[in-house]
Amino acid sequence: MNFQDNLNKILERQEELFNVLSNGITGEGFIKASKEYSELEPIVEKVQRYNNVVSDLSYAREFLIQEGLDHETRDLFEAEVRELSASLSYLEHQVRIALLPKDKDDSKSAIIEVRGGTGGEEAALFAADLFKMYQKYAVLKYWKFEILSISEIGVGGYKEASASIKGDGVFSRLKFESGVHRVQRVPATESSGRIHTSAATVAVLPEVEEVDIKIEDKDLRIDTYRASGAGGQHVNTTDSAVRITHIPTSVVVAIQDEKSQHKNKSKALKILRSRVYEEQRLAIEADRSSARKGQVGSGDRSERIRTYNFPQGRISDHRINLTLYKINQIMNEGRLDDLIEPLIANNEAQRLADQL
């Protein structure tokens, strides 16, 4: 089946779904058909634009082969053929991208976890800066940013922090943030002005519901204890802190931020569910990707993906050899799209190449 045949099948499928929805279907069938129809809509729009240009280009080429055209008319139609050909090439690329298999988790909200890595206090300070950068980015995207847990150190840094970010397609945009982020700067605690290098790790997990993954109560060990350290002083008199261990995978989540043991347990379960789901998702993806070339990173959180060089005002993404001199706009204003858009484009290009 050639490219145009595939496009015709899409248009036919949309018409079938339209007829099904128009015939008064109800219940689960209606929900399923409505979901498929809405997913097809943006693809169909691109296909229709592509087909319109194909038709216009065909007409212009047919007109050009007519005899007796004056020089001026021929020049006009030759210019139109060039413009339409360029538009057709662009639209075909857009349609092919729209037809790429979707990651079923792309539409999900996400849980983001940031941890200070090598570098002591400076690493913790950088982790706090990264966490706040993602919070600012969420505001720009009109997403809901809910802090789940923060473990602070005395100088204002974060040993680790996690948040739930809710909105359409959050995971699709943030999933490339997983990995090691390296920083080069003069720490606030450095009196000699010497540049230090430290790092923080970021993990982005699709936020999942109970229907996405089944976790049996018998597979959980739940321990309660008294909260301690920064952020926990207000609950030191009760066993409100919660530690949950998923026995089959050894995934452990501990939360102590809330006064209520019930709230801490709820937050811990939300993170645990996403971590277990992510382990399964990455295992499946690793199998699928074993023969795939040139991915945007491996998703391995031990991989250094980006360097933030404050003295030079630059951010470099090592996966796509991208360097931007916009460190203040990105870190202080959350303008991450300047990094994320090229990563998405590169990923789409590689996936298209894999299909050829």
Image: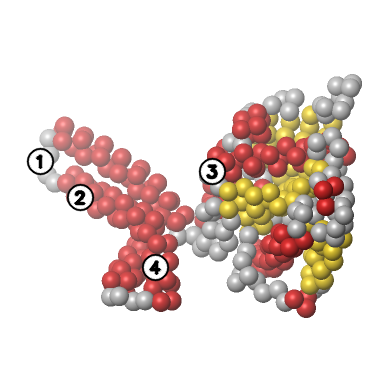
> Circle 4: is it few (<14), some (14-19), or many (20+) Cα within 10 Å?
some
Measured in 3D between alpha carbons, the distance from the residue under mark 1 to the one under mark 4, in whole angstroms, is 53 Å
- The kind of residue tagged 2 is Tyr
User: Which circle marks residue 68 in the picture?
Assistant: 1
User: Which circle marks residue 201 in the picture?
Assistant: none
Q: Position of residue 17 (x, y in %)?
A: 34, 70
- The kind of residue tagged 4 is Ser
Would you name the residue on which mark 4 appears?
A: 34
Quadrant position of residue 199: top right
> Circle 3: is it few (<14), some (14-19), or many (20+) Cα within 10 Å?
some
Residue 339, can we see it?
no
Q: Nearer the viewer, residue 354 or 194?
A: 194
Secondary element type, mark 2: helix
Q: Is residue 79 left or right of residue 104?
A: left
Q: Nearer the viewer, residue 278 or 309?
A: 278
Would you name the residue on which mark 2 appears?
A: 59
Secondary element type, mark 4: helix
- The kind of residue tagged 3 is Lys
Mark 1 or mark 2, earlier in chain: 2
Measured in 3D between alpha carbons, the distance from the residue under mark 3 to the one under mark 1, in whole angstroms, is 57 Å
Would you name the residue on which mark 3 appears?
A: 141
Q: Position of residue 336 (x, y in %)?
A: 60, 39
Mark 3 or mark 1, earlier in chain: 1
| Residue drawn at (43%, 76%) of the image | 28
| Residue drawn at (20%, 35%) of the image | 76
Q: Nearer the viewer, mark 1 or mark 2?
A: 2
Mark 3 or mark 2, earlier in chain: 2
Q: Position of residue 84 (x, y in %)?
A: 30, 44
Q: Nearer the viewer, mark 1 or mark 4?
A: 4
Q: Quadrant of the N terminus?
A: bottom left
Vertical relation: 72 (above or below) 346: above
| Residue drawn at (57%, 59%) of the image | 108
